[in-house]
Image (cartoon, rainbow, N blue to C red):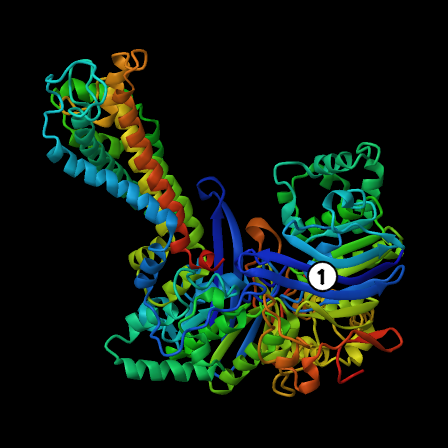
Amino acid sequence: MLTLEHLTKIYKVGTFGGTDLPAVKDVSFNVDAGQVVSLIGESGSGKTTIGRMILRLTPATRGTITFDGQDVLKLPRRGYYRLVQGVFQDPFSSYNPIFKADHVFAMIRGVYFRGMPDSEWNARLEAALEAVGLDPGQVLHKYPHQLSGGQLQRLLIARALLLDIRLLIADEIISMLDASTRIDVLNLLGDLKARGLGILFITHDLSLGYYSSQRTVILLRGAIVEMGATEKVYGNPVHPYTKMLIASVPLLHKKWRQVAQELAATGTPAADQCTYHSMHPVDHGAGASAVARPALAEVEEDHFVGCIRPYVKGSC
Amino acid sequence: MSAPGEAPIAAPGTIGEGSAPVGMHAPEVVPGVAPVRQRREILYFALRDKRILFGAAVVLFFVILSIVGPVLDPTDPQAFDGPTGAPPSADFWFGTTTFGEDVFAQFVNGLQATFLVGLLGGGLAAFVGIAIGFVAGYRGGMVDEVLNMITNIVLVIPTLVVLVVIAAFLSARGVVVEAAFIGLTSWPWAARAIRAQTFSLRSREFVDLANLSGLSSWKIIFREIAPNMGSYLFMTFILLFGGAVLIAATLDFIGLGPTEGISLGLMMNNAVLWSALQLGMWWWFIPPGLGITAIVGALYVMNVGLDEIFNPKLREM
Amino acid sequence: MSLQVTDLRVYYRTLAGDVRALDGVTFKIADGEIMGLAGESGCGKSTLGKSLTHFDSRMRYVAGEVLLDDVPLPIMDSEAMDEFRFWSVSIIPQYAMSAMNPTRKIGKMIVDLLESRGEDGAAMRPEIERRLELVGLQRDVLDRYPIELSGGMKQRMVMVIATLLNPSLLIADEITSALDVSTQKAVAETLIEFRDRELVRTMIVITHDMSILSQIADTITVMYAGKLAEKAATDVIIGAPKHPYTRLLISSLPEVGIRFADKRLTGIPGNPPGLLDPPVGCRFQARCPLADEQCRQEPPFVEVERDHHVACWKVS
């Protein structure tokens, strides 16, 4: 459904934009209907930038984004936003504080549903609210600060559903919510996926990614280091960065020491064992002789890994 | 970032889900009553705020005085008819000047001129400053750089020198010309302030959401960003209004003001020129001084109240 | 050193009345213990932490006694607390890393801080450098400005500053929240390091993240709506909690190993009660599956097993 090919974003910073700051480097993956793909990365990994580029909030420097085969930039903006929508991290920043929370619905009604009679609109609205588990009486006609973070995030999902979207970009949508409400929103995403919605779940939290997604993409400083089916990436991590991430996640029932031991057993691939290296045994060089980023190497079916050199200095 | 957010108000000690501040009950929607619409709510709260009522009353008083005054006292403010230097009396409510001019007539006519300069000059400066501020803040990038350059250039132009040159070319100047000049030279700081506010609001996610709802840039500026800055914009206008009044007084003082007519600033300056203070003619400079202070002060007081109106979050505290 | 808190009540003054943020809290911490303080937003854990050093002038101390090593701590009196702050009790407040003066070099700031406490800043330099090494920071950090450091580095810097004078009690409020998962682990492990090297005797680690506590805390105290719900050893809280709230909370946390498709977790419906006018009796009644008439009376916080305290009628 959604395909990213060689997506790149380079910011120009410094005086008169003289210096290049690459935020996203040659990223390619897809999201299919009825599938949750989690995009995992720490701060500075470029994951939010990717989400924004898909939503056309930030222009890409290179590469293409296609939806059902069509270049997304060639589609009319308003039409595109009936296919793809986004929900962001901070529920309180997503609402204009001087308007009531319903304003977000009024905004789309004015653009997309002009001329729809009130009764029909209200019926649609109530249906969307019920689909996200909210009681219309409790959430309508209130200001954002009178509602909880969980309610606000669900309202935004309801808004997206009103537009009959097919792809939802969820950027850290639960990191600012309390533990007891997080799981409700996550379960909601699971239900929506079961109804055919495609979801790009952007997060830094591996446990959430594991819980919700079928496929995982791991980003490091703008480039993909590992990606594939979630069980395979978590169950058999190959890239040292992925292993480090998994080792750092605090678990409830296992101490760090134990996790580290289990992972240490698998070891970091040496040059001649590195799956990537065996496919691309070229010294990447630097400067003019640098080889452009080659494709990811296949570890097993639906499990790919990138070069470990940017992460482990001095290898190969 | 994985920091769970805190509630938007300074809710003490809460982290995690940004729920309603600790202890705050969401006010109940009264059953059976249709929810009050935005504007009516604003009006409702506005009419109950003492600061707004007080400020508006003072300003209104002076506006009415400026309209009704010349009717009550149709004397030509610059006619040398009365007794010279006379203190307030039944005939001359504010006394007379050294030359026998009716101070009250000067005062009420001066009020008119003052309001006109403030309105036109302040209004023009506000219009230009706000427009440039919005565009620079929202678009950023090259547009912002260019507009910034223009702002800085206008900021450093020596306005007095330019005015002297203009005065040399325009022998007869009215209040409108003065207002236009003030308007075109005092907007830079307003543009800067508006730009900074727009910048900070622009990066808020609700602007992204408006974008995702298919709204165009201008619509977003006017419907989402500007109302958020409502009191800020009004405050900007008030400051420019007050500034225009004060600048006009200064210009009047050095003879670069309108070549005819009377204003509060001109009254004060005449009073100083003719040693009213030393001669004890308090009725000459106190009314215009108090007038300017009262009007500008009342506007500031109103603005404090308005901030609460425009920001529903502050209302409940 | 041991900490004994008896019936601590701290309210916040607001225009609408007193918000009863901390409403009668009693507990003990043993020498050398790392106690985790967990709960969701509005439960009062941050208030508890801040009240022990009289950190926030908006607080109104209604009642309560605190004994530090059998010496009464004058928490109600901010000036009297001056003698204890930094030497006996030290707090790392939330967002401390953003609170460093951006216009001063870090070394200069530390010297100023020490001198305000009557210590010789220059003489302490070698000790400061030793501590920096301990947490994995370079000495030249002292000559840098805060903006030059990453989030993790700043957090560790703040930890060094707070523990310079070897306080008996360290209160750490959400120090891992804003960090990447790899840095979280480093910071959490640093806390243990401090305790093991006896730079700090006892710690209260405040966080909403139970999994971090399960890694580093000896005991965990769970708070709800201004009151203590349960306190026990970490393994017991995580593995065999007794209070309904704790049980629901633990079971709502996604972990690597749990997938939505296999086992759907559930959250806790509803929201915590407002503390301006708290409900009579057990504060969790409205959301508790076990609540009944008995819960209209407030349950006492009693020891149901050795070193395991619970405030619930259904348990005791």
Q: How many marks?
A: 1
Nearer to me, A121 or C128: A121
**Residue type beneath disc 1:** Arg
Q: State the residue in front, A310 or A21.
A: A21
Q: Residues within 10 Å of mark 1 (few under 14, many from 20)?
A: many
Locate residue C57 relative to residue C310 in the image: left or right: left
Question: Quick one: quadrant of the C terminus of chain C?
Answer: bottom right
Residue C161 rendering spot, x and y as whole percentages: 76, 45
Instruction: Please name whichever residue, C231 or A62, is drawn nearer the observer in this view of the structure.
Output: C231
Q: Is residue B139 visible?
A: no
Q: Quadrant of the N terminus of chain C?
A: bottom right
* Residue that numbered label 1 is attached to: C9
Residue C151, compared with residue A86, is above or below; it is: above
For residue B163, side relative to residue C117 (left or right): left
User: For numbered disc 1, what is the local secondary structure?
Assistant: strand
Residue at image coords 75%, 54%: C52
- In which image quadrant can residue A292 be found? bottom right
